[in-house]
Image (tube, rainbow, N blue to C red):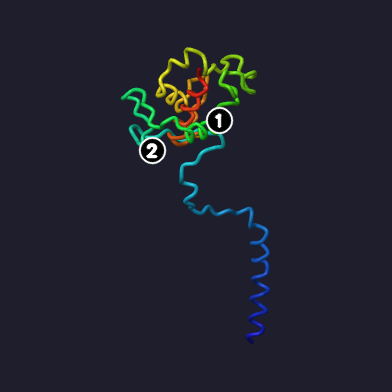
Amino acid sequence: MIKKLIIAMGVLSAPLIIGLLFTYDVIKIEWISFMEIQPNYRPMEDPLPLPARSIPVQGAAYIPELGVPTNPVEPVTNSLTRGKQYYDSSCALCHGVTGEGNGGFSGFLRKFPPVSLVDADRSALSDGAIFVTITEGVAGKMPHLRENLPTPEMRWDVVNYVRSLQP
C-alpha cells in the first residue's frame, strides 16, 4: 500500500516538477535587497558633494572664508623629494618636467594650454594661492587634484617643489 502511494505521488508530482523547471526563468519573484535601496553611482559619475562646512577626516586643508592658507611644511630635502615624485606623477604631463608648460600632453590642450610655473606671474603668487589652485583647479582649464594628491601634506610638498623650480 505504501509502495503504491509513493509511486502515485511520484507520478503526480513529476509534471509539477518538470513545469517548475521550465518556468524558472519566466516567473521571477522580486526579493527586497538592501543593495537596491542604497544610492549608487554610474561609472565616471561624480560623487555627491560634501555637506556644507564639513571637515575631512585628515582635517581642514583650508577654509575659504579665511583666505589663502600659509604653508605649514618646511621646504627641506624630504619635502622637495616627495614633491618631485608627486609633481612628476600628477603635474609634469601638462606643465613639463621643468614647469615651463611644455609637457607631453600640452600639445593637445590648444584652447587652454598649461601655464608656465616658472614665469614672473606665477612666482609672485603666494604658497597658499598655489595650494588652492592645486586643490580646487581652475574652472574649465585645470582639473582639481584632490583625488590625485589626497592629503594636504602631499599638495604642500608639490608647492615646495614648484617653488624650487622657480628662479
Identify the residue at the far bottom of this view: 1
Instruction: Name the residue type under label 1.
Output: Ser
Crowding near the residue tagged with mark 2, few <14, some 14–19, many ≥20 C-alpha atoms within 10 Å: few
Nearer to us in this view, 80 or 139: 80
Q: Farthest residue toward the front?
A: 77
Distance of label 2 from label 1 (alpha carbons): 22 Å
Residue at 58% x, 22% y is 98
Residue that mark 2 sits on: 56
Where residue 41 appears, x then y in whole percent?
A: 51, 38
Query: On screen, 57 above or below 126?
Result: below
Coordinates of residue 147 in the picture (x, y in percent): 50, 34
The first of marks 2 and 1 along the sequence is 2
Secondary structure of the residue carrying tag 2 is loop
What is the secondary structure assignment of the residue under circle 1?
A: helix
Foreground pick, 43 / 89: 89
Name the residue: 64% across, 19% down: 108
Q: Quadrant of the N terminus?
A: bottom right
Say which amino acid is labelled 2: Pro
Q: Residue at x 43, y 26 (%)?
A: 131
User: Disc 1 marks which residue?
Assistant: 90
**107 versus 56 height, above or below:** above
Direction left: furthest residue = 66
Relative to 115, say whether 17 is above or below.
below
